[in-house]
Image (cartoon, rainbow, N blue to C red):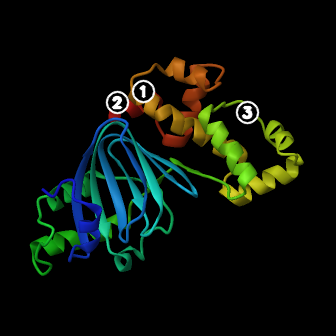
Amino acid sequence: MPRNVALASVDAADRALIVIAHEYLDGTLVRSHRHRRGQLIFGATGFLVLTTPKGRWVMPPQQGMWIPPHTLHEVQMVGAVTTQSVYLRPEMALEMPRNCQVVGISPFVRGLIDKALDLPLDYEANSHAGALMMLLRYELQRLPELPLSLPLPMSRALADACRAFLLKPNATDTIDRWAGELGMSRRAFTRGFRRETGLSFVEWRQQACLMTALPRLLAQESITTVALDLGYENPAAFTTMFKRLLGVAPRAYIQSL
């Protein structure tokens, strides 16, 4: 099983598609970097937080994250993280999303990745191994996007306000407060916010709270504590938001990981 392979070796590999595994300690920070290949990360354990100039993404255990070729990104590990990465040459990534995404990984795709990890980096392309890798390539194009991304605005003042919010998220924060602090009318703020992030302020605020909550819940903090810290009136209100975005209640989601 190829493990902890240096990035230079990944980019220089002969095969158009390769799979490798990495293991990281809790708190590991992989500083800003980029690679020529596109990367699909599957996280077997722990949370992974990806930050780029355009936004932030949280990848829970048993889910995946797509990073397009040449994307400048920084990665923070929350908990001990074991990853399995599929690297695609740029020409193979043309049919993949053009932006970073957190994606669902089906048991079938997990199985393909597990089998691919048993292959050497220089597997024979015209063989059963090559066919397996081609099947994996096409399955990657079908992965469903999950609502665990948080785009950041391009304008500096608005981006600074968003980053400040991420340091202390508050589910009751208002458009009027943000607009007032930025010296904007409510209408100009809401239009500008959606234009720069693709989300309404309320949608962005909810996703920011969700992304803050997930690592804490995985660390076995109580739902009540997390909900109240985020400014929700009660755990039920937090659970309603969580279920609307991820389809299940917080306890059921964590138990499924």
What numbered label is drawn on residue 166?
none
Left/right placement of residue 102 relative to residue 207 reads left
Q: Circle 1 is placed at which residue position?
A: 251
Q: What residue is drawn where x is 29% and y is 71%?
A: 11
Provide residue 85's location: percent of width, then percent of height. Answer: 28, 57
- Is residue 243 in view? no
Determine the CA span between mark 2 and mark 1. Answer: 6 Å
Query: In the rendered structure, which amino acid carries the disc numbered 3?
Result: Asp
Quarter holding residue 216: top left
Determine the CA span between mark 3 and mark 2. Answer: 30 Å
Provide residue 116's location: percent of width, then percent of height. Answer: 17, 62
Query: In the rendered structure, which amino acid carries the disc numbered 1?
Result: Arg
Q: What residue is drawn where x is 53% and y is 35%?
A: 212
Q: Earlier in the sequence, mark 3 or mark 2?
A: 3
Name the one closer to the observer, 145 or 209: 209
| Image marks 2 and 1: residues in contact by CB distance under 8 Å | yes
Left/right placement of residue 8 relative to residue 214 reads left
Q: Circle 3 is placed at which residue position?
A: 173
Left/right placement of residue 187 relative to residue 226 reads right
Provide residue 223's location: percent of width, then percent of height. Answer: 49, 21
Name the one closer to the observer, 53 or 58: 53
Whether 95 is drawn above or below 72: the answer is below
Element assignment for label 2? helix
Near mark 3 (Cα within 10 A), the count class, few <14, some 14-19 or many ≥20, is some
- Is residue 32 in view? yes
Element assignment for label 1? helix
Q: Circle 2 is placed at which residue position?
A: 255
Whether 57 is drawn above or below 176: the answer is below
Query: In the rendered structure, which amino acid carries the disc numbered 2?
Result: Gln
Quadrant position of the C terminus in the picture: top left
Determine the CA span between mark 1 and mark 3. Answer: 25 Å
